[in-house]
Amino acid sequence: MTTELQRAMAQYEEARIRYKKAVLASLGGASNGGAIRRAIQDFQRASSALKRLTATSPAMPSKPQDDSEPFPGWGFMRRLLKAG
C-alpha cells in the first residue's frame, strides 16, 4: 500500500467522522447547515481521491483467444470425428 493511498484512506475516514459529528451537532442545535455542507464537500473530495487511487485497470483476458478455429462449431465437430 502506497503512502499516497494511506493518506487518502485517512482523509476519507477523517471526513466521514467530521460529517457524522456535524450531523449529530445539528441535531442538538449546536451546528448549522453550513458546517454540514462543508463536511459533505470534504467527504466527497476525499471519496473521489480514494476512488481515483484504488481504481483498477481493465482486466486482462485469462487466456489468449484461440483464433485458429475457422468457425465456432469446428472444435465440436473435430471432437465428434475423433471419437467416431
Image (cartoon, rainbow, N blue to C red):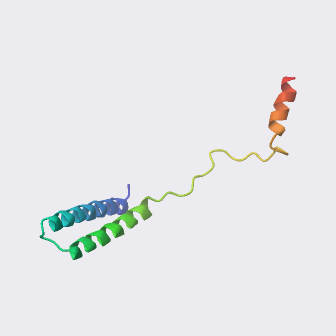
Residue at the far bottom in the pictured view = 34
Question: Quarter holding the N terminus?
Answer: bottom left
In front of the other: 23 or 14:
23
Residue drawn 84% across and 28% down? 80
Give the tally of numbered discs: 0
Q: Residue furthest top?
A: 84
Image position of 59 (left or right of 30): right
Image position of 29 with respect to 78: above or below: below
Residue 26, image x and y in percent? 17, 68
Foreground pick, 8 / 71 = 71
**Residue at image coords 31%, 67%:** 43
Residue 36 in the image: state x and y as whole percent: 24, 71
Q: In the rendered image of this protein, does residue 9 appear above or below residue 36?
A: above
Left or right relative to 63: residue 47: left
In the image, residue 55 sits, relative to residue 44, either above or below, namely: above
Q: Residue at x 63, y 49 (%)?
A: 61
Which quadrant of the view contains residue 53?
A: bottom left
Estimate the x, y position of residue 28 in percent, counting from the top left: 12, 65
**Residue drawn at x 39%, y 66% as measured from the top left:** 48
- Asked if residue 21 is positioned above or below residue 84 in the image, the reply reads below
Residue 84 x, y percent position in the rendering: 87, 23
Q: Is residue 39 left or right of residue 55?
A: left
In which quadrant of the rendered view does residue 18 lie?
bottom left
Would you identify the image quadrant in which residue 29 lies? bottom left
Is 20 in front, or is 67? Answer: 20
Taking depth in this image into account, of 48 and 33 the one nearest to the observer is 33
